[in-house]
Image (spheres, coloured by chain):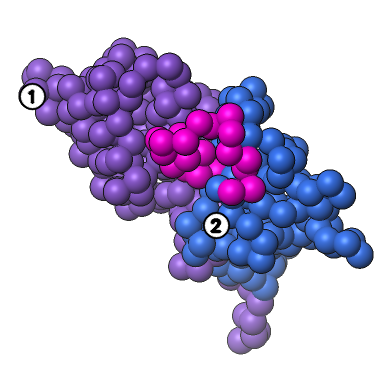
Chain colours: A purple, B blue
Amino acid sequence: ARPRVGYFYTGKSGTQLLTENLQKLYVKDFQSIPVVVSENVSVYDAICTMFLEDVGTMFVVDHNSKLVGVLSRKDLLRASIGKQELTNIPVNIIMTRMPNITMCKKEDLLIDIAQKLIEKQIDALPIVKETENGFEVVGRITKTNITKAFLSLAKDQ
Amino acid sequence: ARPRVGYFYTGKSGTQLLTENLQKLYVKDFQSIPVVVSENVSVYDAICTMFLEDVGTMFVVDHNSKLVGVLSRKDLLRASIGKQELTNIPVNIIMTRMPNITMCKKEDLLIDIAQKLIEKQIDALPIVKETENGFEVVGRITKTNITKAFLSLAKDQ
């Protein structure tokens, strides 16, 4: 028989192999734990939580633990150079609120989330589960997670 | 002759193809324009510049336009909840300073930069050119650029 060294059967091009590898990366495999605050906490307390938890984006929930807003470092920085006393402003005054929140699900493809983060010019998305009285926050996906996924392509495969 | 449909010669596995694609991505092809401020500007003015330019990280330069520090949104937020008047504090009090700055070059591989961003837990690196009296800032590379590179793998190839 002829030697088969250097030949292999796949029926697929390099392009297809790469695309297939990307199509295997899901949100649930790269997600982070979400940090949530109640809509009644002050901007000052939210900033403290952000430093304690060391995150760039926090999610704001109502008394039923359902998503009502998103707080970025940028939102908090904007508020902090204002004239008001930060301990007197509740976060629901300055947060991005429903229905203007871009969300995703655990089963979403990471590549689609990367697209959303770039399109909307945001750093993080809440991962949610729909319930009868709103969206429960079950995770967080950020540009840091995408960067880790990018690294994983070079390492794991 | 036999039909050759579905067969092709490469001598390479899917893993190798993917790794090769990643090894073709360089900092210079995904970089952004850097935003710099002088080391004498106030924290207040730096925050205003950050909002005007809509960036998450700025680089601080001396009177020779050489890199002396890095300012993140986190640094500015920390300063803004302090007791001091923001217009009276120069940025060189609160910035991360040389030699504690992680830098990179235009010719670096993007995958190595992704590794540094994750390891050091930072959002952005200055891209520099070495000169006789220090480092000149010629670009900026961030997790946003890495996210765009991740997307480009799915689109371009």
Tell me the amino acid under the disc marked 2: Leu
- How crowded pointer 2 is (Cα within 10 Å; few <14, some 14-19, many 20+) is rated as many
Quarter of the rendering containing residue B54: top right
View extreme (right): residue: B132
Tell me the amino acid under the disc marked 1: Asn
The answer to whether residue B134 is visible is: yes
Residue drawn where x is 91% and y is 64% of the image: B132
The reply, left or right, for residue B75 in relation to residue B50 is: left
- Between B108 and A46, the one nearer to me in the picture: A46
Q: Which residues are magenta?
A: B72-93
Residue drawn where x is 45% and y is 29% of the image: A77
The reply, left or right, for residue A140 in relation to residue B153 is: left
Quarter of the rendering containing residue B32: top right
**Residue B117 numbered mark, or none:** 2
Residue drawn where x is 26% and y is 20% of the image: A88
The answer to whether residue B77 is visible is: no
Question: Which secondary structure dominates the residues rendered in magenta?
Answer: helix
Helix, strand or loop status at disc 1: loop
**Residue A70 at what x, y percent from top left?**
33, 26
Q: Is residue B80 magenta?
A: yes
Residue drawn where x is 55% and y is 57% of the image: B117
- Between B9 and B99, the one nearer to me in the picture: B99
Q: Which residue is mark 1?
A: A64
